[in-house]
Amino acid sequence: MNVLIPLALALILINHQKIRDDPYYRFSMLSIVGITYFFIFRYIDYYFSIFSPGDIWHSITKVVAVLIAVGMCLSPGMTKSTAVKTGVCVFLFAVSILAAFGFDRLIKVAITDLGGYFDGPPKVGTQRYVGEAVRYTSKAGGYSLSIPSRWERRRHESQADYFVVQNEEATLAELRPRCFHKTGVVIAEVIKNLEADALIENRLTESHCFKQKDAHVCLVKSIASAQISPLERWRWLVMNPATQQNIDIDVLIYIDNAAIKDEVNFVFSSLKIESLPTPAPICLSTMDWF
């Protein structure tokens, strides 16, 4: 049962007469209930969906929020309601609704920041590569990469560039540089979706997130638990929460080869970000690859 239902029932049973006879108190109480349900519950649910400390703590946190809301509604300062107090409560309710829908992304970014989602140490890949490499620039993405020369550049039917390394006719790995600017998504939600997709495909996931200058960076590895293709899929996600410049370096690895993995780490570490023009270029979506 939603914990808001006991809150409403408790208030109605305890103060049913005042709720009926005092419109100022009625609107004040409804405003507090609305703030609890539409704002506080919304971001409690978001926090626990990202950090997953356990269902019991999720329920306890919501119960505490309900008890605080009930205490406020039953406090002498609230029961002795006036037009000014009611106006303040209604105003706060309106602000919470506007914040939840108008600044949702910024609030979620703040929650992941304050919750320590990006407190991991920087993930540094292979900084140096002994072979030859070429510089690849993505104008739409606003970044450039160093790609080992043996990775062959190709053009997808969607007009997207990608790179493959082959042994005779067999493809050993594939690298897809992409971007998804101005989508309004939060990197923690992207990671959550990738983990859900991996679970459906019977894959294990490893993720490591940290801050790098103004960007949030995550390396997500999806590893097959059975002999399915690809054997591993690595995603190097770089998202600037202020400008919403979002970069996705997607790598499919078909064999367990240490040299190829070192080369992929070298590509990741070679990423250099440039500023985007205004308006931001339109990037290809993930669906354009299928």
Image: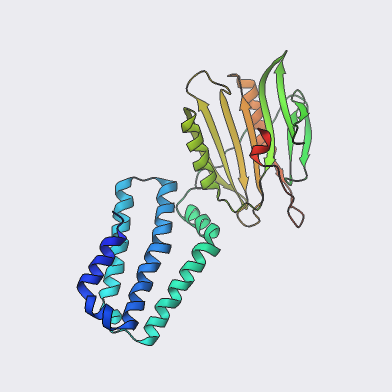
Of residue 33 and residue 71, the one placed in the foreground of this image is 33
Residue 154's image quarter?
A: top right
Percent across and percent down for residue 142 are 74, 47
Residue 274 appears in the picture as rendered = yes
Of residue 17 and residue 46, the one placed in the foreground of this image is 17
Percent across and percent down for residue 7 are 27, 64
Residue 106's image quarter?
A: bottom right
Give the residue drawn at x 39%, y 45%: 52
Q: Which quadrant is home to the C terminus?
A: top right
Residue 92, relative to residue 183: is it above or below? below
Give the residue drawn at x 25%, y 75%: 74
Residue 91, relative to residue 52: is it above or below? below
Of residue 41 and residue 269, the one placed in the foreground of this image is 41
Percent across and percent down for residue 185 are 57, 51
Percent across and percent down for residue 69 are 31, 68
Q: Kindly give the residue lying farthest to the bottom in the view shown.
A: 83
Residue 53, relative to residue 131: is it above or below? below
Residue 126 appears in the picture as rendered = no
